[in-house]
Image: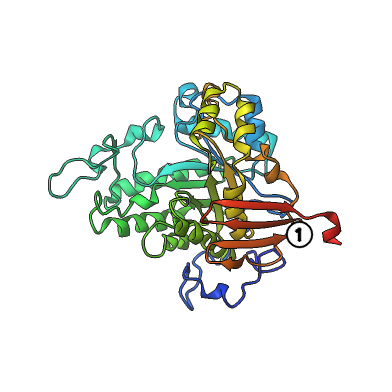
Amino acid sequence: MADINEDDGISPAPIEANRSKFKIFQEGEADPLDGDTSNFPEFNWEHVRSWVAIRHAFRYSKKQIEQLAAQDVVMLEKANGHRVYGSVEAGTLEAAKRIKQVNPKVKILFYLNAMCHYGDYAANKTWEEDWALRYTDTNELVKWRNRIISYDHRNVDFREWWIKRALDMTEHEEIDGVFIDGICKVGHRKYCPPDHAAAYIATANELRSRLQPGKLLIGNAVRAAQRGDCNLKHLKYLDGSYLEGWQQSKDTIRDTVELISVMGKQGRMVMLTSTPMGMDQKVTAEVKKTRSLEKRYDIVEDYIDFPLGVFLLGVEKWGYFTYHYGPPDANPRRLNVFDPTKFKKVTDKLGMPMGDYAIEDDYILSREFEHLKIRVDIEKQHAVITPKDERDEL
């Protein structure tokens, strides 16, 4: 078991940090995962650590595989390789094998949705229609976006089917874990009965207990806009969480900084996703018009400072950043930007954090790393990322 506080670059928590309104564990509550980070990706502070969520219905090119192999974590999204290999499971495994051949250290996650029943999975051959969630008053099927049927975690037969899907994939050495999407839906007041969220937790805890040793369980769970504890309770069975939807307001952005910090300090992986912020209609039109993927990368690079600055304010060990434009689809015809390592500020020297972020004003925060200074004005959605002059480091 790894000691998460021993010489690992986690910022010491000052008194004020311990008063955070966000907590994974209550006073005196033990971590069910025992703070074990031995199966986490290798980590250092040389530069910003990166991750990618990606799909390709056909086959990744050699160059795309090399791009994916340059990341710390790759989550192979739904709809991977099924048009070539016959199913999402087969396509995911083939992509994972090719990535691992280039870089065995990349952690690769298999995508599994907590609530949405997507097509093209081989496991769907044994799916039973009786397992779908229905409205209690009309008995009609619950459908997300009016077309995707929903799972019902109260059904124990369904629960076994769903868990086995995950375990069958993590039996492969190339699959390092499972990414559970849609966790924010499990207790949706409009679609789910009152006891459904607890039923999902039971499913998730059983998956955790049966997961093979050394495998990761990551979820799309923590979200600043979520009521109450921002879904931190799910980190009692998850090794970490994807963070999306954080740009909604100045308060969700401010809270996301603190959530990133709290998660890292308590031994959980953070996988923040971000897109260009501040692009006006003219720039957006320019990006859409250009048919050069390299040119698209050049344009959106000018808008990375704010989301990257937000991430760096809170990041601790096991924090990973991605920056993209367009859906996570690697089909070359779509010209989507998905590789964060192509941006200079991601690969520039970073160094260990010199402490926690400082609060200059309610929504103006700053922080220093060995090789970098950052200052973020959340209200103006503006960040300044300044490399330290070598003379400053002497």
On the image, the x and y values in percent for residue 74 come to: 58, 41
Q: Is residue 26 left or right of residue 115?
A: right
Residue depicted at 38% across the width and 35% down the height? 123
Residue depicted at 64% across the width and 32% down the height? 298
Farthest residue toward the left? 138
Could you say which is closer to the camera, residue 229 or residue 104? 229
On the image, the x and y values in percent for residue 194 come to: 24, 58
Residue depicted at 34% across the width and 32% down the height? 125
Residue kind at label 1, given as amino acid type? Glu
Residue 194 appears in view? yes
Q: Is residue 32 left or right of residue 61?
A: left
Residue at disc 1, secondary structure? loop
Q: Quadrant of the C terminus?
A: bottom right
On the image, the x and y values in percent for residue 95 come to: 57, 32
Residue 70 appears in view? no
- Which of the 4 quarters of the picture holds residue 139? top left
> Is 46 located above or below residue 330 in the figure?
below
Which residue is denoted by mark 1 in the rendering?
370
